[in-house]
């Protein structure tokens, strides 16, 4: 199991692997990742419209993706003073092979 950031590849431990797989195991979350990958960073209201789900539901999915390290967020102020929480997908490359599972399992509690 690996997570690639640019040219550096690091092994994920068992907990990180489980978090990533769990976060990606839902259709809404895959749609969120796809929307952010295609359209770039976006704020919650616009992303909710693009994905077709409510903002509260989107927040729940984004929280799970963020906990797994698959998306990041940044709070910014708009020109009219509104706080907008922008999300973007992180660069990741998860290779799931028997060998990477063996390595990850050794780190599980």
Image: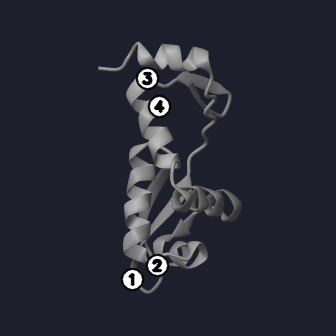
- At a point 45% along the width and 51% down the height, the residue shown is 65
Rendered location of residue 21, percent (x, y) = 50, 39
Quick one: 73 or 70, which is closer to the camera?
70
Q: Residues within 10 Å of mark 1 (few under 14, many from 20)?
A: few
User: Which residue position holds label 2?
Assistant: 78
The tag earlier along the polypeptide, 1 or 4, is: 4
Q: Are marks 1 and 2 in contact (CB under 8 Å)?
A: yes
- At a point 68% along the width and 28% down the height, the residue shown is 7
Q: Quadrant of residue 75?
A: bottom left
User: Which residue position holds label 3?
Assistant: 13
Gap between marks 1 and 3 measured at Cα = 41 Å
Q: Are marks 3 and 4 in contact (CB under 8 Å)?
A: yes
Q: Nearer the viewer, mark 1 or mark 4?
A: 4
Q: Nearer the viewer, mark 3 or mark 2?
A: 3
Secondary element type, mark 3: loop
Gap between marks 3 and 4 measured at Cα = 6 Å
Quick one: 9 or 96, which is closer to the camera?
96
Query: Looking at the picture, does residue 82 appear above or below residue 21?
Result: below
Secondary element type, mark 4: helix
Secondary element type, mark 2: loop
- At a point 61% along the width and 42% down the height, the residue shown is 91
Model colouring:
one colour
User: Which residue position holds label 1?
Assistant: 81
The tag earlier along the polypeptide, 1 or 3, is: 3
User: Which residue position holds label 4?
Assistant: 17
The tag earlier along the polypeptide, 3 or 2, is: 3
- Of the numbered discs in the image, which one, if any, rests on residue 107? none
Rendered location of residue 6, percent (x, y) = 66, 34
Q: Nearer the viewer, mark 2 or mark 4?
A: 4
Gap between marks 2 and 4 measured at Cα = 36 Å
Q: Residues within 10 Å of mark 4 (few under 14, many from 20)?
A: many
């Amino acid at each position: 199991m690996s997570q690639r950031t640019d040219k550096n590849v690091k092994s994920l431990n068992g907990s990180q692997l489980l978090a990533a797989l769990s976060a990606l195991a839902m259709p809404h979350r895959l749609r969120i990742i796809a929307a952010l990958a295609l359209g770039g960073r976006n704020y919650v209201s616009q992303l909710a419209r693009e994905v077709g789900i409510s903002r509260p539901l989107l927040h729940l999915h984004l929280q799970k993706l963020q906990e797994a390290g698959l998306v990041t967020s940044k709070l910014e102020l708009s020109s009219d003073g509104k706080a907008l929480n922008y999300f973007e997908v992180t660069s990741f490359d998860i290779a799931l092979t028997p060998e990477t599972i063996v390595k990850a399992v050794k780190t599980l509690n």
